[in-house]
């Protein structure tokens, strides 16, 4: 990486072998967990999480209470882990009306989008007495993790709860760590009331997720846990997968921007800084214009001192971000597909041509008037997205994550008689004679019935 002045983002010349190696090293560092919350190393996290999960499995409510006391300095009773419906209603009544109006507008956008993309069962295949179809049913009970941390994130609550409601989930549980005073942050309760969610569990993150996956004396298990969190929450979801469904193992937030010489440098710089602000966060610009790279680098240095989280931004820019200069936009698309970013922005003269070459990205923001914060808060698609390169195989959270499919297969007697010999032969090739018998016995019964009728005659 080229040495640059303080507060600037480094430039990598990927037109050289050395630069390509540096770009790959950055990709691997971000993908391999090198970027973790508050600089926390990952070495001891799996062991710590496993110990908490085992404790909850063994002691139930008592373990959840103890871990909440250890990590948050309060000692609730098992019953006090749940926020009462009366407290939720009171918080909603006390909420700023302007805040609630804003939340209603965002929720309406999310709801409209999720309804449009909700998967519908196609008409069944009907052929010769065979009817083959699929049925989608909503999950019965899901939990939404809302981080506590340094700030409250009502957006995370909207982006998880509303898609589940559109899907028709029977019961929604909000799980969040205690804030000041041992209660959830006020905005969480206010928004829970606005969305009509009456079950809010206030407990230490990993212990609460373990309880929701395994079940305790007072906490019933759920079918799925979704929502963002720190490295411990992510590891807990990874370890609990199988006992419960999860959305993905999301990590720190990231953006990759593809831009050419037509892009406005200060806009690109602002977009990079917006994503790096997450603390931790990473921001990568890939461009075929070295002149743009230099201008963006300068603009980052000019804009950064004006922002509140300056120390975190400086660290993110220097250690987890870069401007990668490539030989063409086609190469830029190759880099983007390799990184498989959570957010991808396209700031080029002909963005749709670039879009056609993109295969791997969580959410794609097209054109100069579509900054990522539109997706974070307002546009409609959920901002719960795959990170760390997992956009190669994970998708954004949506209404369809709260639906499960059941295959529907129905044969009549004639269709069974036509297919049974082939099924029986197939089963015998695998040495599963009981499988063969299960179809053949139905034909034998039919033949015997015919013989009986013939004898009576």
Image: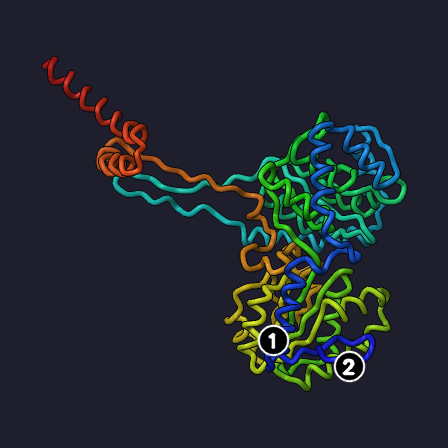
- Percent across and percent down for residue 206 are 73, 41
The residue at 64%/35% (across/down) is 222
Q: Quick check: 75 above or below 194?
A: above
Q: Position of residue 226 (x, y in %)?
A: 65, 46
From this viewpoint, is residue 102 visible? no
Quick one: quadrant of the C terminus? top left
**Residue 128 point in image, percent of width and height:** 25, 40
Residue found at the very far left of the displayed protein: 457
In the foreground, 135 or 9 = 9
Q: CA distance from mark 1 to mark 2?
A: 23 Å
Q: Is residue 405 visible?
A: yes
Q: Which residue is mark 2?
A: 298
Horizontal side of residue 136 vs 249, given as left or right: left
Which residue is located at x 80 percent, y 32 percent? Answer: 65
Q: Residue at x 72, y 70 (%)?
A: 272
Q: Could you classify mark 2 by the number of other residues whose Cα lies within 10 Å: few (under 14), some (14-19), or many (20 or more)? A: some
* Marker disc for residue 393: none
Q: Residue 218 in the image: x percent, y percent? A: 73, 27
User: Total number of numbered labels?
Assistant: 2
Which one is earlier in the sequence, the residue at label 1 or at label 2?
A: 1
Q: How is the image coloured?
A: rainbow
Looking at the image, the residue that sits furthest to the right is: 181
* Residue 385, above or below 239: below
Residue under label 1, please give it: 20
Disc nearest the viewer among 1 and 2: 1
Query: Which corner quadrant holds the N terminus?
Result: bottom right
């Amino acid at each position: 990486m080229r040495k640059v002045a303080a507060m600037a983002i480094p430039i990598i010349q990927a037109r050289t072998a050395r630069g390509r190696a540096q770009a790959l090293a950055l990709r691997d560092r971000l993908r391999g967990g090198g970027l973790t919350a508050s600089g926390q190393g990952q070495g001891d996290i799996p062991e710590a999480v496993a110990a908490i999960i085992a404790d909850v499995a063994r002691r139930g409510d008592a373990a959840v209470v103890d871990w909440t006391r250890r990590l948050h300095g309060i000692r609730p009773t098992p019953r006090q882990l749940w926020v009462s419906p009366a407290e939720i209603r009171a918080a909603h009544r006390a909420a700023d009306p302007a805040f609630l109006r804003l939340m209603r507008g965002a929720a309406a956008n999310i709801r409209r989008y999720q309804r449009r993309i909700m998967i519908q069962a196609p008409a069944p295949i009907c052929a010769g007495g065979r009817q083959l179809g699929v049925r989608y049913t909503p999950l019965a009970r899901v939990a939404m993790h809302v981080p506590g941390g340094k700030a409250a994130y009502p957006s995370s609550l909207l982006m998880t709860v509303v898609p589940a409601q559109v899907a028709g989930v029977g019961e929604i549980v909000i799980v969040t760590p205690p804030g000041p005073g041992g209660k959830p942050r006020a905005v969480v309760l206010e928004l829970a009331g606005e969305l009509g969610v009456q079950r809010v569990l206030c407990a230490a993150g990993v212990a609460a997720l373990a309880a929701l996956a395994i079940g305790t004396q007072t906490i019933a298990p759920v079918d799925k846990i979704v929502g963002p969190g720190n490295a411990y929450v992510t590891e807990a979801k990874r370890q609990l997968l199988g006992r419960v469904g999860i959305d993905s193992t999301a990590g720190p937030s990231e953006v990759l921007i593809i831009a050419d010489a037509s892009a406005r440098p200060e806009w690109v710089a602002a977009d990079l800084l917006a994503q790096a602000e997450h603390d931790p966060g990473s921001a990568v610009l890939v461009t075929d214009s070295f002149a743009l790279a230099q201008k963006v680098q300068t603009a980052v240095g000019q804009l950064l001192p004006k922002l509140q989280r300056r120390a975190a931004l400086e660290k993110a820019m220097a250690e987890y971000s870069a401007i990668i200069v490539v030989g063409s936009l086609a190469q830029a698309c190759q880099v983007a597909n390799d990184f498989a970013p959570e957010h991808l922005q396209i700031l080029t003269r002909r963005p749709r041509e670039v879009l056609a070459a993109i295969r791997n990205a969580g959410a794609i923001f097209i054109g100069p008037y579509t900054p990522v914060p539109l997706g974070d808060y307002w546009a409609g698609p959920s901002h719960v997205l795959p990170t760390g390169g997992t956009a190669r195989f994970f998708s954004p959270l949506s209404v369809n994550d709260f639906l499960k499919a059941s295959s529907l297969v129905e044969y009549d007697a004639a269709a069974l008689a036509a297919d049974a010999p082939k099924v029986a032969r197939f089963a015998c090739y695998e040495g599963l004679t009981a499988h063969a018998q299960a179809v053949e016995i139905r034909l034998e019964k039919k033949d015997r019935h015919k013989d009986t009728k013939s004898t009576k005659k």
